[in-house]
Image (cartoon, rainbow, N blue to C red):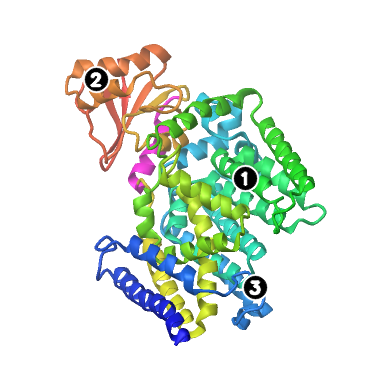
Amino acid sequence: MKNKIREIPSNTFYQLLIIYTILIIMITLSILTKYTIHMEIFALVIGIFGFFIIKNDINIKENDLKFLENKYMHYGLLIMALLIIFLLRAIPYMNNQIPLGYDTGMYKYAIESGLTNLDKWVVMIEEPGFLYLMSIIKIFLPSQFILTWLFILFNALLGFAIYLTTKEYFNKTIAIFSVFIYTFSIIQFKVFEFMYYRNILGITLALFAFYFMKKDRKYDPVAFAVLGIILAGIHKPTFYLFGLSYFFYSFISPIKNNKTKYDLKLLTRNVIIGVIILIGGFLFYLGNFTIQITNLVEPVLIGFVSPGESPGTFITFFQYQFTTLIYLPFALIGFIYLIKKKEFNVLFFWTLISAIIVYFQFFFFNRFIIFLDVALIILASAGIFSMINDKKRLGGILSIILVICLIFSSFSYALNSKPNINVSEFNTINKLAAVSETNAFVMTTSSLYSPWLQGYSDRKTIAPGLFDYDLHTKNQWNSFWASNNQSEIVGFISEYKTKYNSPIYIFIGEKQKDNIQGIKCTTLLYQENNNKIYRYEC
């Protein structure tokens, strides 16, 4: 009788999971929209239920999935996953040579001229470590290759970092699961699509650092410290999360299992390594780049006092929940299991801190979804492993169905992924260098095209609210966009001619209103479709 009562939670869990899987299939096939019902609440219920009924240790080395422990099968699957990561991200470039992302032009300029010119905007936002790295890489590779195929390779390298870290903190089988979830994660494909280059490099460095910290062989602390220092110079937000995670882990890890002793020797070592990383990382920002540190203090503090005001450019948490429905319940299982097992390792703090930042909307909270997703991918693989170990056949069938849905969704998304601008717009922007003098300024009146002109016009760029040559406030730009008065428009542009005493050329893209057409002092020099280049003559 008692056994039958104990089976009730287990049976209920799998019944709910079967219903959830059917709904996921319907959403994948567009029979049902993902916003029709509160699937995120359903995922939460399953995650909590799974915590109570799955009792297998997710850290055990011996498990029922022996075929995944086979060396040839295991490494064959790993290589396959890494190849699919590359191929999936190559899909948008099958018939297209224009890099993806909004920041692409800014990256191109930073790679080619960032350290040479040291523009104010470069010094304020582009991490010095990234600029140093790219200054070496560009010796061997053209910027176009760096922005496309090398970036894809770095995405695959992140997949490998996820595999290694998961393998070290859990086991080989969970590591294979994690790299496949990453391979088909739409969120991680969005990171690639948005061209978040430094994010990818930063997370890769952080995970490799966590891998060496866990190994703890003779020279692993040195590798951990070196990677942490490099991370500080490559990407500040990743280092911020990395530092907070390591800080809390440093003080928790010396607590012994019996809680009667506190390992002061381990604490001292942790603190020394942390101080070395902080000092080494700060060296990157001496001189011109110190402003990046001082400028961060105020917005970070404001983010805690007035949350929700500095989201960063990425999807919202609401969108995130519904984009990750396929693996969200298993991530919850994995995280809650860590709490039950009291595995308060650095991955636990990485997950917890990023979740707090995202949920409570602290500084740059939307961008921290990227970090949270990587952590949940690892935990989801642990949750799936635990489910399969509990009920091998049913768990395996449900896992395969959900993975097929994930594959279908990711390939559909990749096939529809396109650059922010089309060929005609791209060609017209590249034409600017041919029709203008080398000392000329090019002006875009739309923020959509601003980074593209900065990177591809080969001229000093005037853009609303960006770069070094903008002379107007947001309100003044709003008045300019709304104006139909020729005198006001001419007066607005004339300020740049007077200030810089150089030829002024104006790019108008087909996605924006052309309030330059027909006004005095402008001559149309080039047009391709509805993309135009004007020369300002007054």
- Asked if one can make out residue 488 in the rendered structure from this viewpoint, the answer is yes
As drawn, the residue found furthest toward the left would be: 484
Circle 1 crowding by C-alpha within 10 Å: few under 14, some 14–19, many from 20: some
Number of residue marks: 3
The amino acid sitting under disc 1 is Phe
> Is label 3 in contact with label 1 (beta carbons under 8 Å)?
no
In this rendering, position of residue 73 left or right of residue 487 = right
* Alpha-carbon span between mark 1 and mark 2: 56 Å
| Residue for badge 2 | 489
State the quadrant of the C terminus: top left
As drawn, the residue found furthest toward the right would be: 218
3 or 1: tag closer to the N-terminus: 3
Q: Residue at x 29, y 17 (%)?
A: 492
Circle 2 crowding by C-alpha within 10 Å: few under 14, some 14–19, many from 20: some
**Closest to the observer, 155 or 237:** 237
Q: Quadrant of residue 302?
A: top left
The amino acid sitting under disc 3 is Ile
* Alpha-carbon span between mark 3 and mark 1: 26 Å
- The region drawn magenta spans 422-437
Percent coordinates x, y for residue 466 in the rendering: 41, 28
Q: Which mark is residue 420?
A: none
The answer to whether residue 21 is above or below residue 212 is: below
3 or 2: tag closer to the N-terminus: 3
| Residue for badge 1 | 248
Circle 3 SS class: loop
In this rendering, position of residue 276 left or right of residue 192 = right
Percent coordinates x, y for residue 33 in the rendering: 26, 64
Report the magenta stretch's main SS: helix
